[in-house]
Amino acid sequence: MDLAFLQPLYEHPGPWASAYVDTSRHSEAMAHERSLTAAAVSRELADQGADQATCRAVRAAVEELPPSGARGRALFARAGTVVLDPPLAGAPPGPSASWAPLPHTAPLLELAGEDPVCVVAYVDRRGADFELRSGLGSQEAGSVTGKQWPLHRTSSADWSERHFQLKVENTWEHNAAEIAEALAACQDETRADLLILVGDERERRAVHERLPKRVKHLAVEAPHGAGSRLLDEDVERIRAEHVHRRAADELERFLAARAPDAEGRPGAVEGVPAVVEAAREHRIDELLLRPEAPDTHRSVWVGPDPDQIAVRRTEVTALGEQDAWPARADDALLRSAVTTGAPAISVTTATPDEVPVGGLGALLRWK
């Protein structure tokens, strides 16, 4: 998950109010229910010591949340101002709020989800129409038209007809190449995470094979023939499979990277002390978190700067910072990841040895 959108949270000092609310239910009593939720969240923040201005800002923001396709909303506020309120792809289990030195961003890995943006290519022999699909809906994303003649085979064995069929083959190949090139350009422009090919098997396979290497791994073929349109549930299923597959691939890469390289350096570490050290040295290439694992809510010590993070308070003061506060390990490590441009991913595992150990791990960079 790209965490760049969280950057505004780390441009200001804490403490921070963090709230998660469910916006998936719609009814005639929605306004009243939203008001009750806002009051409960504000009260919970006040009980934890939040200032009145911040409590009022969060309460007003929850009450005024506009209708949207989001199933929930996260709100992060300080000093009487809501700084960030990202939509959630999944509904939180209930309204919750926390008041802490750092914003409580860890639930976003599960609730915001990766929300992969997709380009759906409806392919036939003549060309393709592109559609951009995301959690916010769909929109047209262009089209490409190839050669229009000749396109149809004959059944004759006559030499001239075989020559014609060769021209048909050449036309199909030419069109498939043009579609592949246009689809790659569309991905470059939209930064789509996933390309979904829809059409008869032969046509979509021809396009898939001709995609440039840089985007080929992003493409999947939907089992729908020419003229079919993907329903929302089809796209959601494909997107969910993509997210699950990517998490499994990253976990496999993490497991392989734990062994030291030729210079004796590991490519991955796990457990709070090792991951904290990697964060302090700006070596996290990707952060891995296992939801609800024991170490994710373990306390570490942090200072005002993202690389001021340690298992013991004395280690923070040794870095030259006299002020240090306890914070959740997952939130502190996410702050480090955001400020060094590292992505993070939520992983689950069914292996007997729960990995990463304690629920926290990191792939490392050494350059």
Image (tube, grey):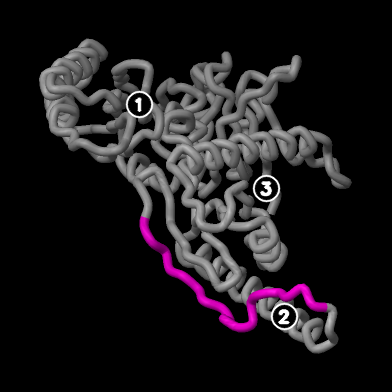
First in sequence: mark 1 or mark 3?
1
Q: Could you tell me what secondary structure mostly forms the magenta stretch?
A: loop
Q: Name the quadrant containing residue 142.
A: bottom left
Magenta run includes residue 63: no
Residue depth check, mark 1 versus mark 2: number of the one nearer the observer? 2
Ranked by sequence position, the earlier of labels 1 and 2 is 1
- Left or right: where 41 falls relative to 186: left
Q: Is residue 272 visible?
A: no
In the displayed structure image, the side of residue 51 where residue 100 appears, left or right: right
Residue 264 found in image quarter: top right
Q: Which disc, if any, is residue 170?
A: 2
Q: How far is the residue under mark 3 from the one under mark 2?
A: 46 Å
- Name the residue: 35% across, 47% down: 137
Q: As rendered, which of 59 and 189 lies closer to the eye?
A: 189
Mark 3 and 2 residues: CB-CB less than 8 Å, in contact?
no
Helix, strand or loop at disc 3?
A: loop
Going by the numbered disc 1, the residue's amino acid type is Pro
Placement of 213 over or under 311, stated as above or below: below
Assign the C terminus to one quadrant of the image. bottom right
Q: Is residue 143 part of the magenta span, yes or no? A: yes
Magenta-colored span: 139-156
Q: Is residue 131 above or below residue 302?
A: below
Q: Which residue is mark 3?
A: 365
- Assess disc 1: are there few (<14), some (14-19) or many (≥20) residues with their C-alpha within 10 Å of its C-alpha: many
Q: Residue at x 54, y 52 (%)?
A: 193
Q: Which residue is mark 1?
A: 101
Nearest-to-viewer mark from 1 and 3: 3
